């Protein structure tokens, strides 16, 4: 009845997703920025390492979803690379300055995607009218929308998620994401009526470095040595309530 997609920030996370029982991964870099396009090497290695479905996010930067002509061109190139490397699906979304779906930019990207299924990502949660956005996205030919119901978490957005599921019917899949965990996935499923779920199931990983320079940090990390990664244990634990 249910399908589970893992937001994977590394090849190791992809492998853990598969081992934990996930149906699909969304491969992305730049997790602190909300997910950006992964590298050629990451996509290729992920495709070679897992047999479950592999979706690749196409997002040139963090920040808003209003893209310049140059950024759209970059996204088209990245779409071609992802397809050549064996991606089963693509994940992207573009908005206009007024908060509507940027139909011109999306049509350019959809043409590049061709027959490869497209998920419209959480740019949806920044639209001015989610029901208009739903119809626009369906008209473009996208197969899925990843959304928290325009709230900080999917549980908080469950009421709108349920309305979107009903409005979409069989035309498109509404997939709740953001804050989906072991202790709430069953409640989100009950309230929303959704059948696909997106979560990261990450845990902190301690660095193996013995020498550490406390005076130097990289970027804005609180811990410049440790990192987070998906674990098979948490994937399995999150899926379990819906089995």
Image (cartoon, helix red, strand yellow):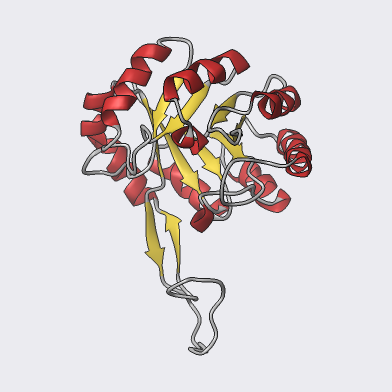
Rendering coords of residue 155 (x, y %): 26, 37
- Asked if residue 106 shows in the view, the reply is yes
Left or right of 12, for residue 233: left
In front: 181, or 208? 181
In front: 135, or 198? 135
212, above or below 109, in the image: below
Residue under the point 35% across and 24% down? 2
Left or right of 76, for residue 55: left
162, above or below 90, in the image: above
Toward the front, the furthest residue is: 98
Residue under the point 60% across and 45% down? 49
Rendering coords of residue 241 (x, y %): 23, 35
The C terminus lies in quadrant: top left
Rendering coords of residue 28 (x, y %): 57, 47
35, above or below 3, in the image: below
Residue under the point 58% across and 36% down? 54
Rendering coords of residue 41 (x, y %): 71, 52
- Asked if residue 23 shows in the view, the reply is no
């Amino acid at each position: 009845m249910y399908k589970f997609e893992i937001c994977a920030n590394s090849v190791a996370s992809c492998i853990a997703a598969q081992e934990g029982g996930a149906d699909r991964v969304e491969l992305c870099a730049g997790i602190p920025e909300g997910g950006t396009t992964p590298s050629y090497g990451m996509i290729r290695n992920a495709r070679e390492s897992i047999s479950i479905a592999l979706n690749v996010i196409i997002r040139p930067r963090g920040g808003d979803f209003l893209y310049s002509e140059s950024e759209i061109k970059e996204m088209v190139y990245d779409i071609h690379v992802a397809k050549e490397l064996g991606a089963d699906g693509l994940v992207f979304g573009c908005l206009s300055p007024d908060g509507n779906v940027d139909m011109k930019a999306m049509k350019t990207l959809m043409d590049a995607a061709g027959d490869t299924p497209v998920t419209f990502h959480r740019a949806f949660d920044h639209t001015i009218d989610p029901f208009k956005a739903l119809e626009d996205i369906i008209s473009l030919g996208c197969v899925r929308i990843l959304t928290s119901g325009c709230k900080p978490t999917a549980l908080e957005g469950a009421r709108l998620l349920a309305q979107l599921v009903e409005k979409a019917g069989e035309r498109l899949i509404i997939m709740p994401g953001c804050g989906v965990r072991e202790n709430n996935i069953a409640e989100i499923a009950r309230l929303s009526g959704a059948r696909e779920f997106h979560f990261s199931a990450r845990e902190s990983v301690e660095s193996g470095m013995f020498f550490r320079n406390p005076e130097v940090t990289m970027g804005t990390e609180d811990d410049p040595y440790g990192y987070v990664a998906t674990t098979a244990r948490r994937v399995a634990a999150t899926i379990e309530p819906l089995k």
